[in-house]
Amino acid sequence: MKLKLLASVAVAGLLAAGAAAAEPNGWYGAIDAGWHKAEVETDHNVDFDVDGDWAGFARLGYRFDQNWRVELEGGYRAGQMGDVTNATSGASVFCNATPAAGACLAPDGDIEAATLMVNTIFDFGSADSGFRPFIGLGAGVNRVDTRFAGTFAANRAVGITADDASTELAAQALAGVAWAFGDRGHLDLTYRYLVSNMSFDTTTSNPIIIGAPGEFKGRYTDHSVTLGLRYAFGAVAAPPPPP
């Protein structure tokens, strides 16, 4: 009888410890930083490559229970413009502005994106697990700033520039894993796939000869991997009463 009583007390103690280690429901905050790679496909059959660069995110979320949470996420993705090529042939379309002769290098400029998203996330595993995979979907808006100066590959004496921005609806899918430290903190390793429409206007130095391309419309896609710190603000649930 005494052995059974001691075993019951031990099990209750373990359950209480597990409950105390679980992340509390309620509000949480997080910051993430990492790397991303973007690409722009346009209706002119021209692809704009964006060099891999850093990305940063700030999140404010609310956990409803130990599996479901929702969050508001602001993000920024830096990006220096890479090669601009024909989508069919792969040949260069635009080159660097200076020098006007020589090798056709990437135009000088940037394609940067700022997002505001609402994410719904599902955490796998139990509430007191130290390692939890998660998946999620997000919807919001994406502002893409396009700025560059270059020349036409077919005629290096004619320049083309852009300094424009567009804001369009965006969607993203995300997945990752979280490691718990304490009952409030987590490290989040997150992969995000973002897609949205975008557009920008261009001007040429000699539209009579070349014919100004004018507005480019296309699709912005991005892959990012970040490491983030998440901290829960909610009140820790009281442990169950002893038997």
Image: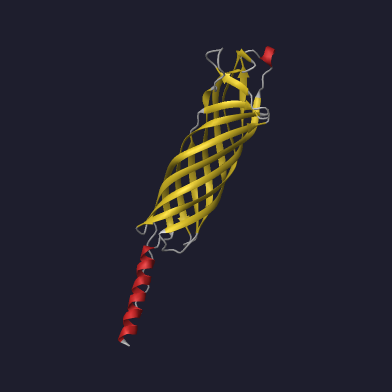
Q: Nearer the viewer, residue 110 or 105?
A: 105
For the point 59% across and 26% down, the residue is 84
Q: Nearer the viewer, residue 217 or 11?
A: 11
Q: Nearer the viewer, residue 214 or 83?
A: 83
Residue 208, position as x, y percentages in the image: 69, 12
Tell me: residue 198, above or below residue 233: above
* Quarter occupied by residue 88: top right
Tell me: residue 98, above or below residue 17: above
The reply to whether residue 210 is visible in this rendering is: yes
For the point 66% across and 30% down, the residue is 87
For the point 65% across and 16% down, the residue is 154
Q: How is the image coloured?
A: secondary structure
Residue 17, position as x, y percentages in the image: 35, 68
Residue 110, position as x, y percentages in the image: 52, 27
* Quarter occupied by residue 6: bottom left
- Identify the residue at the far bottom of this view: 1
Quadrant containing the N terminus in the rendered view: bottom left
Quadrant containing the C terminus in the rendered view: bottom left
Residue 216, position as x, y percentages in the image: 64, 28
Disc count in the image?
0
The reply to whether residue 241 is visible in this rendering is: no
Tell me: residue 149, above or below residue 181: above
Q: Nearer the viewer, residue 34 or 76?
A: 34
